Image (cartoon, rainbow, N blue to C red):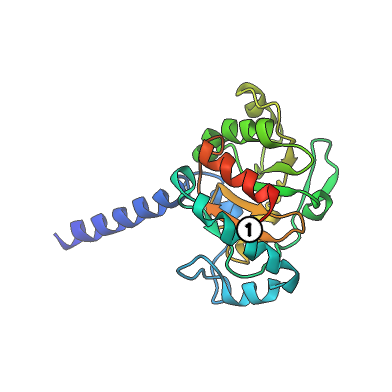
Amino acid sequence: MIGLVAGATVAGAVVGALALYGMNGLPGNASATKPLTAETKPQADGTVPAATAALSDPDCTGAVTTAKGLAPLAKGELAAFSLATTPRRLPELAFTDADGKPVTLADLKGKTLLVNLWATWCVPCRKEMPALDQLEKVAGGKDFQVVAINLDTRDPKKPHAFLKEIGVSALAFYADPETKSFQALRSVGRGFGLPTTLLVDAKGCELGFLAGPAEWASEDALALIRKATQGI
């Protein structure tokens, strides 16, 4: 009986872990994770004190003000979206474009960015790709861009084939097969599973983040993105 109870407890814990992102136990996630330490263990609000202090930037104070103005719009499909409460600059994320050329997040500054980390082995990621593509079609331009970074580590052709299969046409292709961008975000409490999505202002300051999938083509998402792009 004790064995059965223990087994049920473990099974419940596994289900709970999987529920967070819907795919933490799938093949491939291990390559995008590392053990938590006292410095990287997330707190109840998802932040990491030491890392947060290291990335604190007074120049990002305006982002916090903007985030407060977005609070009424973080509802419905985006009810789980966490808005910035402290001025933080994201770590320098590095990846490559469709031609394999190096790109950093700083190269894309000057517009509001929705940075999304995804992989083909992540079921929730696959489901939200069409919505992200639609968001880029509707809102993308000189003031806003969806930056979807693929983290597949094995077959580089697989994500291209998947996006072609589902008809994605508006998203620019970015890849990080070494998952360094994921590790950089994880070190500051912003990457503990996939998908992970962050909203960044034109200065590279964090406006908010979401752990898990969302319906990014919804009216809720469009309203928030449009307000963030306009500024407060």
Toward the viewer: 113 or 162? 113
* Residue lying at 43% horizontally and 52% vertically, measured from the top left: 20
Question: What is the secondary structure assignment of the residue under circle 1?
Answer: strand
Q: Quadrant of residue 163?
A: top right
Residue 78, x across and y down, in percent: 49, 47
Quarter of the figure with the N terminus: bottom left
Q: Is residue 83 above or below residue 151?
A: below
Toward the viewer: 78 or 158? 78
In the image: residue 56, left or right of residue 70: right
Q: Is residue 39 above or below residue 7?
A: below
Residue at the left extreme? 1
In the image: residue 196, left or right of residue 93: left
* Residue lying at 84% horizontally and 36% vertically, measured from the top left: 99
Quarter of the figure with the C terminus: bottom right
- Residue carrying label 1: 207
* Residue lying at 62% horizontally and 30% vertically, measured from the top left: 134
Q: The residue under label 1 is which amino acid type?
A: Leu
Residue 101, x across and y down, in percent: 86, 43
Q: Quadrant of residue 146?
A: top right
Q: Is residue 205 above or below residue 30?
A: below
Residue 191, x across and y down, in percent: 58, 57
Q: Is residue 197 above or below residue 125?
A: below
* Residue lying at 53% horizontally and 36% vertically, measured from the top left: 219
